[in-house]
Amino acid sequence: MDQTNRQIISEYLGGDNFLEMVSIPEGKFMMGTSYKEEGYSNERPPQQVEVSSFYLGKYPVTQRQWQAIAKLPEIGHQLNPDISHFKNEVAPVENVSWIDAVEFCKRLRKITGRKYRLPSESEWEYACLGGKSSRYAFGEEISSDFANYDSRLQHNSEASVKYRGQTTPVGIFPANDFGLYDMHGNVWEWCADPWHEDYRGRPAISSIWEFGGDMQYRVLRGGSWKHDAWECRAANRRKDPFVNWYNYYGFRVALSDLA
């Protein structure tokens, strides 16, 4: 994996707690699925998107990071510091709703002075692929040696089936070519965008697609420990009401610039 010359910034959250952000280069990619025989209508039509450079969390937000921010004064929504079902401070925080994730970003903004936010859906997919044009960051197939998902439900045969049955510590699987970990599996990750049924009328830039969507539903990406490889594809999309939470919903944060 080519991860050279990737700028990484670390936000200090107190104690030995840091939030690492990786620089993602500008570029263009085909968003959605171009496989005629597969996928869902909500992944079409495939469209070239121009992505501006930004920063994205090296890992999903962990329980340790969540606890540090959740203990800060409320801005618009109360947060439970001990929200996760699976207790492990270096595993992703889960049981998180979209409004929880947005509140986390607001509190992080306040203590850092930087405009932290959830990634747009197009930023997330571009970052997940790490410059590739395949189903996964690692090629056309994926195995349980590369991600935490339910490989018992694999759509193709796999020699080694591993089902962990819960979240795993971040960073134990290989990074993609942008130096990001756990983009496939572990927890579904909330994106900023409201839900759109497909990509018709979608802007060809990577900003949040605010207009024309269903504001009651927000987008999740990446699959989880509970779901199969098919749901872990980079192009796969999931929607849920912004107030919903499960022990396989988490998030990572984005940042447009360091100003």
Image (tube, rainbow, N blue to C red):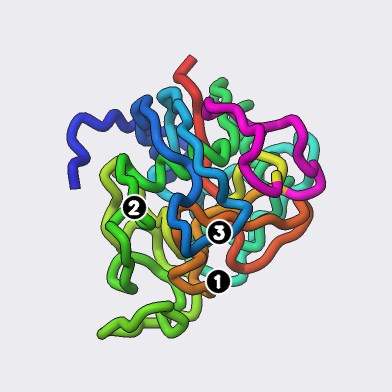
Residue 258: x and y in percent read 45, 19
In this rendering, position of residue 252 left or right of residue 2: right
The disc placed on residue 134 is: 2
In-front residue for pair 201/206:
201
Mark 1 neighbour class, 10 Å CA radius: few under 14, some 14 to 19, many 20 or more: some
Q: Residue shown at 59%/33% (left/top)? A: 117
Q: Are marks 3 and 1 in contact (CB under 8 Å)?
A: no
The disc placed on residue 86 is: 1
Instruction: Give the SS element for disc 3.
Output: strand
- Amino acid type at circle 2 is Ser
The segment highlighted magenta reads 197-217
Q: Residue shown at 61%/55% (left/top)? A: 41
The disc placed on residue 199 is: none
- Amino acid type at circle 1 is Phe
Q: Residue shown at 47%/44% (left/top)? A: 125
Q: Is residue 64 above or below residue 226?
A: above
Residue 189: x and y in percent read 56, 53
Residue on which disc 3 sits: 188
In three-dimensional space, the C-alpha distance between marks 3 and 1, rounded to whole angstroms, equals 15 Å
- Tell me which secondary structure the magenta stretch mostly adopts: loop
Please report whichever mark, 1 or 2, sits nearer to the chain's N-terminal start: 1
Q: Quadrant of residue 21?
A: top left
Camera-nearest label, 2 or 3: 2
In-front residue for pair 59/121:
121
In three-dimensional space, the C-alpha distance between marks 1 and 2, rounded to whole angstroms, equals 32 Å
- Amino acid type at circle 3 is Trp
Instruction: Give the SS element for disc 2.
Output: loop
Residue 206 on the magenta segment: yes
In-front residue for pair 71/154:
154
Q: Are marks 2 and 3 in contact (CB under 8 Å)?
A: no
In-front residue for pair 131/244:
131
Mark 3 neighbour class, 10 Å CA radius: few under 14, some 14 to 19, many 20 or more: many
